[in-house]
Amino acid sequence: MEVAAVTRHLLSRAGQAALVLWAAFTASYVLLQLLPGDSILIKFQNPELGLSPQQIAEIRAHYAAGSPLADYVSTLAGFLTGRLGYSIDTGAPVVERLAEALPETARLASAAFLLAVLIAVAIAFAASYSRTSWLRGALLSVPSLFISVPAFWLGILLIQIFSFRLKLVPVIGGSELQQLVLPVLTLAVPISAPIAQVLARAIDHVYAQPFVPVVEAKGATRWWVLWRHVARNAVLPTLTVAGLTLGELIAGSVVTETVFGRAGLGRLTEQAVNAQDTPVMLAVVVLAAAVFVLVSLIVDVLFPILDPRLKAAA
């Protein structure tokens, strides 16, 4: 009986995830079609290329630029079967361009997410453990400062300080680790802010529960209570926010990779926007939506495992 309930729950969430992906694809497709200009004509209707109207029509057919409804159905069928079309800018398959850019962004995003979690945990725990009101208030105001700092400004500031002033990180050349330090820090600082805010509020909420004075009355230290009892109960809302921030990493990488000249999905998106390369832009949007939906699905599945009360209610 329990297995059947879990199966129904997973199938329901998977169906909702598929619906969200379809809505993201449809909305992105419609908005990209409403963009002013014609990307195919911009690239190929050039007198220096010497293409005839018939050849341009064949190119439009190759890129599925015909009837809007037929194009939508054809593009959707291609995405369902793994055929994402061809880049208008380079002529290469979109799958190949994504495969070239994805590993770079994956390294940057995973490292930035881990650093953001560490920063958020350090701020929230230090604020909760602090016995001085002014220090606690100062620590709790740090996330608001982090989230208000523009990523492009932070990246330029870090380059100015660590590369030009202190000369610790080379601007050109250097090892892979040296090239990754500043972009990871630029991407992690804004993302750590909402995680730290939610974690700090969740810790305060758990501290107000009746079981905390009981544990303290048994002789447990403040650090033991915080680490073993309070943090364990405060992790659930934090896990939700942390999962949501993963979906923002691809969007944040656009600015970060542009500032630091990294060849990832961010740089690919910037090039696609400048060239009005709609197949690439559509693929990047759907990929970001797929990552967001997958992470949300994983978090939703983990909730009953981490909290037995939710499992019993289900």
Image (spheres, rainbow, N blue to C red):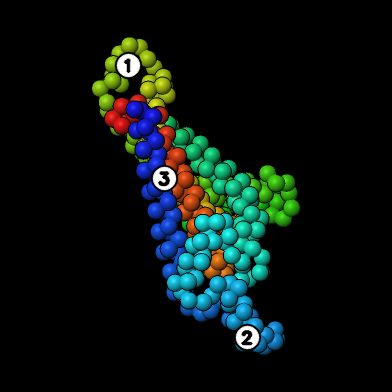
Camera-near label (1 vs 2) is 2
- Which quarter of the image is occupied by the N terminus? top left
Q: CA distance from mark 2 to mark 3?
A: 45 Å
Q: Looking at the picture, tell me which residue is in the foreground, 46 or 270.
A: 46
Tags 1 and 3 touching, CB below 8 Å: no
* Residue at (51, 79) in percent of width and height: 37
- Label 2 neighbourhood size at 10 Å, few (<14), some (14-19), many (20+)? few
Q: Is residue 169 toward the left or the right of residue 32 in the image?
A: right
For residue 44, side relative to residue 18 (left or right): right
**Dot label at residue 39:** none
Q: Nearer the viewer, residue 80 or 200?
A: 80
Number of other residues with Cα within 10 Å of mark 3, as a class: few under 14, some 14 to 19, many 20 or more: some
Residue on which the image places disc 2: 54
The x, y position of residue 48, in whole percent, is 70, 86
- The amino acid pointed to by label 3 is Ala
To which residue does mark 3 refer? 14
Give above or below for 307 relative to 255.
Answer: above
Image location of residue 50, percent across then percent down? 70, 87
Give the structural element (helix, strand or loop) at label 3. Answer: helix
Image-quadrant location for residue 198: top left
In the rendered image, the vertical position of residue 209 relative to residue 185, given as above or below: above
CA gap between label 1 and label 2 equals 80 Å
The answer to whether one can see residue 79 in this image is yes
Q: How many marks?
A: 3
Q: Which residue in the protein does label 1 denote? A: 215
Asked which quadrant contains residue 112, the reply is: top right
Instruction: Tell me the amino acid under the disc marked 1.
Output: Val
Q: Give the amino acid type for the residue marked by disc 2 in the picture.
A: Gln
Task: Please say whether residue 268 is visible from this viewpoint.
Answer: no
Query: Could you tell me how far apart the alpha carbons at marks 1 and 3 are, in whole angstroms?
Result: 41 Å
